[in-house]
Image (cartoon, grey):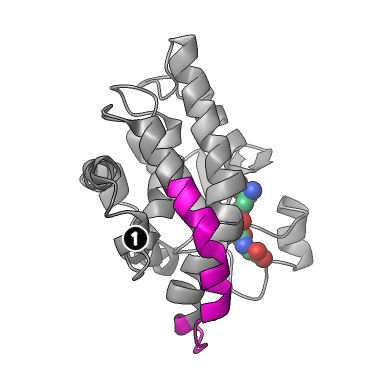
Amino acid sequence: MSEFTVHSIPGSPFGRAVLATLEEKGASCRFSPVAPGTFRSPQHLARHPFGRVPVLEHGGFLLYETQAILRYLDRVLPVPALTPANPKHAARMDQVMNINDWYLFQGVGNVIVFHRVIAPLMGLAPDEAAIEAAMPRARAVFAELARLLGEQHYFAGEAISLADLLVAPQIGFFTQTPEWSVLGVPHPNLVAWLARMEARPSLKATTWERVSEMAKAA
Ligand SMILES: N[C@@H](CCC(=O)N[C@@H](CS)C(=O)NCC(=O)O)C(=O)O
């Protein structure tokens, strides 16, 4: 039995970042699916008082907030390192991780991806007005991510870091939306980076389909 348990749901980009980081480290985990409708159950609130996923369990240690989880994993599983030693590169990693949480997910991913990808699965029509309202911020976020990436292979330089593992699952969802043609396609460096990321075994092992299989097997 693995020493790590990940409480999450298939399709969660934050949960996928945790699973992909474990894969990059060559560490196995037990996947513990949080059933839809139970995010605010006493059992899940005891793990995550804000009723979200993912939550990492390591021995008796419970940890939520994806950035904290990724940094914890990088400390307890130091090889291969996913934080650059160079302070400027590490700062860029931290910056991109915060852009992910504050500007890419909040107000962009949780609007556009929600209405284009998740809502239809729930039998809901996309809210076009909400998507339109999110577009100016979305354009700014994608342009800034492309600028920061520049000609580098990864966000923090030539080696993969936690930033790439946090952001790739979020950006991957946009390729399933018509908005990708104006948000992603105009930035060939971002498109090439995503292809590089999605070719990695860690991302291939943590697609929605693969995590659904983990959930069924749990
Ligand atoms: N800041 C949190 C965000 C996690 C998050 O928003 N997770 C989504 C799934 S991807 C969730 O649990 N949503 C449930 C809800 O909003 O009720 C983190 O970094 O872990």
| Viewport quadrant of the N terminus | top left
Residue 131 lies within the magenta run: yes
Provide residue 122's location: percent of width, then percent of height.
51, 84
The answer to whether residue 21 of the structure is visible from this angle is no
What residue is drawn where x is 74% and y is 62%? 43
Instruction: From the viewer's side, name the closer residue of 172 and 135.
Output: 135
Quarter of the picture containing the C terminus is bottom left
Residue at the front extreme?
136
| Quarter residue 28 falls in | top left
Examine the residues drawn in magenta and state their main secondary structure. helix
Disc 1 crowd, CA 10 A, few/some/many (<14, 14-19, 20+): few
Magenta stretch?
120-142
Q: Secondary structure at mark 1?
A: helix
Q: Is residue 86 above or below residue 127?
A: above
Residue depicted at x 44% and y 53%: 170
Answer with the quadrant where ligand 1 appears in the image: bottom right
The answer to whether residue 204 shows anywhere in this view is yes
In the picture, measured across the screen, residue 100 lies left or right of residue 171, that is: right
- Residue 164 horizontal side relative to residue 34, left or right: left
Q: Amino acid at mark 1?
A: Val
> Could you say where residue 109 lies in the image, as x and y percent from the top left?
51, 59
The residue carrying mark 1 is 182
Toward the viewer: 158 or 26?
A: 158
Name the residue furthest top: 86
